[in-house]
Every structure is written in structure tokens, then in C-alpha cells.
Amino acid sequence: LHTSAALQWLLSGDAGQRALLAWHMGWQPAQETSGTQWMAPHLAQLLEDPYDAVRYIIQRSLRSLPGFDAFPYDFLSDAEDLAAAHQEAVAIWSQLPKVPFSQSESILLDEQGNLRHDAIKKLIDSRSDREVRLIE
């Protein structure tokens, strides 16, 4: 299995990497190049990220995707609300039309376009939650 480097960094990178990848998933040129149908469930994984700044960027990028422009989410909510938002985002995505991808394994989807939960969990479990301070 060859997982996309973007998804590896988004799901298992440190906070800086997660923020950078999340921002790019909301960037129109990247969306036009990569398509957007596969992005929402992966961004949804980070709606519960331990860093407020990462959750803020996730919120902006997720709302740029079809079907999520009015997605109700407060990145400063408590853990219970963040978990509920994560589940709601995945539910919304699952109702959208599936698009076949020739490289579905690399974006952690199976042949039917469903999430590969085992691979996603493995990446999240290896995530770096070390403290990161980025100076702008």
C-alpha cells in the first residue's frame, strides 16, 4: 500500500504539517488538480485535533468543499461537540456521490469509494502530538 504523502502528513504529522496540508486542501488550485471528493472524510478526522489552530484551518478547508459550505462547526467547542462534528462530517460525505479513483488505495479508500478505517486509524495512532511553536 502506497499512501499519499499528503495524507500521511495530514493524519500522522506534527501540528505544523497537519496545518499545512489542511490549508492546501482548501486551496483552489490544489482542489482543481486533485479533485475534492476524497478530501472531506480525511479533513473530518482532524475536527478533533488537539491544536485549536489546526482545527481552525480544517474548518476553513472543509467549508470550501462541495456539500460543506454551511457546515456547522466551532473549532473552540468542547471534546463532545468536536467528536459529534467529526461524525456529522463523515456522514455528510458518505451521502455525496462516490467518484471512482484509479489510485483509491493511496487516498485510503477501497474500490467502492469507502474509507479504509484500519489504515486511517493506524496513521492517526502514529500521529505526532508533540508541542509545536511556529513563528510567523
Image: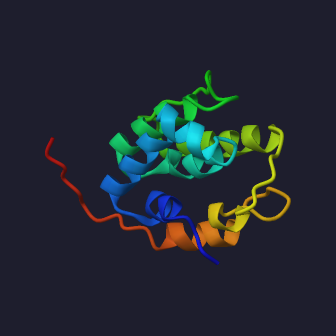
Position of residue 10 in the picture relative to residue 63 (left or right): left
> Most extreme residue toward the left, as rendered?
135
The color scheme shown is rainbow
Residue 19's x, y, as percent?
37, 47
**Among the 4 quarters of the image, the one containing residue 110:** bottom right
**Among the 4 quarters of the image, the one containing residue 130:** bottom left
The residue depicted at 36 percent of the width and 42 percent of the height is 52
Q: Is residue 26 visible?
A: no
The residue depicted at 14 percent of the width and 46 percent of the height is 135
The residue depicted at 53 percent of the width and 70 percent of the height is 123
Position of residue 41 in the picture relative to residue 17 (left or right): right
**Of the pair 105 and 85, the residue shown nearer to us:** 105
**Among the 4 quarters of the image, the one containing residue 129:** bottom left
How many numbered dots are placed on residues in this image? 0
Position of residue 58 in the picture relative to residue 108 (left or right): left
User: Is 69 placed above or below 45 here?
Assistant: above
> Most extreme residue toward the top, as rendered?
70
Q: Is residue 82 visible?
A: yes
**Of the pair 71 and 79, the residue shown nearer to us:** 71
Residue 32's x, y, as percent?
58, 37
Quadrant where the N terminus lies? bottom right
Quadrant where the C terminus lies? top left
> Most extreme residue toward the bottom, as rendered?
1
Residue 88's x, y, as percent?
69, 39
